[in-house]
Amino acid sequence: MKKPILILFLLAFALIGKAQTPTSDPAEDELKAAEPVVKQTTPANLSEADQIFSAVMNEPDFPGGIDGFYQYLQNNFVYPTSDTPSVNIRVQFVVERDGSLSQIKILDKLNTAISSELVKVILKSPKWIAGTQNGKAVRVQYTVRIVINHN
């Protein structure tokens, strides 16, 4: 009789102890509360034509491939000043269904003049071959590392 009561007592004690254990660190909760809240539109709120895909059956491509895109950037990027360093940066953009580029974001810190020039050159880029999903052209978010050497 003592054994079942002891087991029941230990089980109840373990459950009470678990219920009082915090599920997260209070300091971590404070950091999360300090982070800005970014409201994102969920795919459920978007029409199928407006959804932006991050992975598709056929990725978008620049005419001439990614090497062609790098060559285009190297040929068209004009350094704002002669003392500007070489550029090694990640850029994210959306390749639209018609192959144009939109929503260009510089993901790494960069001089404002260089960032502006880079965005300007990317916006003037020849149209890409759109990405496709289930045989239809779709909007695709694309991230690329860009290296432009200052000669």
Image (spheres, rainbow, N blue to C red):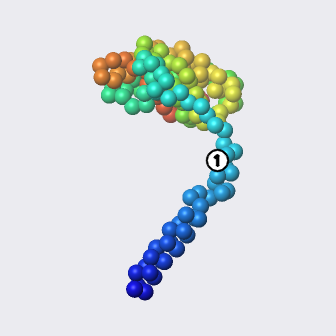
Q: For the point 56% across and 58% down, which residue is it? A: 23
Q: Which residue is mark 1?
A: 32
> Can residue 64 be seen here?
no
Amino acid type of the residue tagged 1 in the rendering: Lys
Camera-nearest residue between 88 and 100: 100
- Residue 7 in sight in this render: yes
For the C terminus, the quadrant is top right
| Nearer to me, 22 or 72 | 22
Of the pair 60 and 126, the residue shown nearer to us: 60
Residue 104: image location, x then y, percent: 56, 24
Instruction: Say few, some or many: other residues with alpha carbon within 10 Å of mark 1 (under 14 / 14 to 19 / 20 or more).
Output: few
Residue 44 sits above or below residue 31 on the image: above
Number of numbered discs on residues: 1
- In the orientation shown, which residue stands out farthest toward the front? 1
Residue 105 on image: x %, y %: 58, 28
- Which residue is painted at 63% across and 21% down in the image? 117
User: In terms of image quadrants, where is residue 137?
Assistant: top left
Give the residue at x 59% y 61%. 22
Q: Farthest residue in the left direction?
A: 135
Picture layout, residue 85 above or below residue 29? above
Which quadrant holds residue 67? top left
Where residue 19 sits: x, y (%)? 55, 63
Provide residue 11's location: percent of width, then percent of height.
46, 73
| Secondary element at image label 1 | helix
User: Relative to 68, does residue 18 appear above or below in the rendering?
Assistant: below
At a point 40% along the width and 86% down the height, the residue shown is 1
